[in-house]
Image (spheres, rainbow, N blue to C red):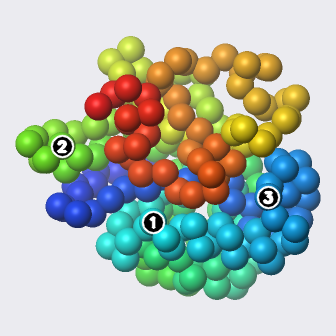
């Protein structure tokens, strides 16, 4: 399991996202996405990313970024996206071998669960570290959750448009209140979500 330490300089941001499912036609039906065709969806999610992410920002993709298991197609899409460093954690639809063939120096492929230590979030305490457990699937338990460590995850495609009888929280998942957050695009208006916004949503800052 990877342990990743990141310090954000003033003005830099750290974003989390997942489950774009670029080039997956049926995801528009399954998740009731508001586009008429796959090209519109691909462009809409790309534009949303580039609207908020800066060139020096850190981005974590928590799985299921691209439907095609084609490193050329994935590389092409990655190169359309802003970001200084882009960490990719594999999801259930991903091939690690394919992800490792992405030709972009910004990309770092990491383990399927990882611990992230972030500092620079508090302007008055710039070296205070926040610890997060990241994964594609939501976790039932993880180290230090009793101390407030949050599990950031994707996979479940939660959000106001999704009516999925298998994976929507409250139907068959029992997630820890205020300690888990679905960073997937369906739960975040098809945008990446910044870590300070996540902490605000969970009442942590």
Circle 3 packing at 10 Å, graded few (<14), some (14-19), many (20+), is few
Q: Which mark is residue 34?
A: 3
The residue under label 1 is 52
List the single residue furthest toward the left. 124
Spatial separation of the CA atoms under disc 3 and disc 2: 36 Å
Along the viewing direction, whichever of 140 and 50 lies nearer the viewer: 50
Which quadrant of the structure image shows residue 130? top left
Circle 1 packing at 10 Å, graded few (<14), some (14-19), many (20+), is some
Q: Secondary structure at mark 1?
A: helix
The reply to whether residue 107 is in sight is no
- Asked if residue 140 is positioned above or below residue 201 in the image, the reply reads above
Q: Of marks 3 and 1, which one's residue comes earlier in the chain?
A: 3
- Asked if residue 188 is positioned above or below residue 14 in the image, the reply reads above
Disc 2 or disc 1, which is closer to the eye? 1
Residue 1 pos. (x, y %) = 46, 43
Q: Of marks 3 and 2, which one's residue comes earlier in the chain?
A: 3
The residue under label 2 is 122
Q: Residue at x 64, y 85 (%)?
A: 76
Q: Secondary structure at mark 2?
A: loop
Q: Of marks 2 and 1, which one's residue comes earlier in the chain?
A: 1
Q: Secondary structure at mark 3?
A: loop
Spatial separation of the CA atoms under disc 2 and disc 1: 20 Å
Residue 179 pos. (x, y %) = 47, 24
Q: Residue at x 48, y 57 (%)?
A: 60
Left or right position of 11 against 82: left
């Amino acid at each position: 399991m990877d342990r990743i330490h990141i310090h954000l300089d003033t003005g830099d941001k750290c974003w989390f996202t997942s489950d774009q499912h670029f080039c997956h036609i049926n995801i528009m039906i399954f998740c009731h996405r508001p586009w008429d065709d796959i090209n519109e969806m691909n462009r809409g999610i790309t534009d949303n990313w580039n609207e908020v992410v800066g060139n020096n920002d850190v981005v974590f993709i928590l799985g299921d970024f691209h439907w095609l298991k084609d490193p050329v197609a994935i590389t092409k899409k990655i190169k359309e996206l802003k970001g200084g460093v882009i960490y990719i954690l594999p999801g259930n639809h991903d091939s690690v071998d394919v992800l490792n063939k992405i030709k972009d120096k910004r990309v770092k492929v990491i383990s399927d669960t990882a611990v992230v230590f972030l500092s620079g979030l508090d302007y008055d305490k710039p070296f205070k570290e926040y610890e997060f457990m990241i994964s594609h699937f939501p976790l039932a338990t993880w180290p230090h959750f009793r101390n407030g460590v949050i599990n950031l995850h994707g996979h479940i495609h939660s959000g106001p448009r999704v009516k999925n009888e298998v994976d929507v929280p409250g139907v068959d998942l029992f997630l820890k209140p205020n300690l888990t957050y679905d960073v997937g695009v369906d739960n975040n208006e098809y945008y990446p979500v910044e870590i300070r916004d996540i902490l605000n949503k969970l009442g942590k800052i």
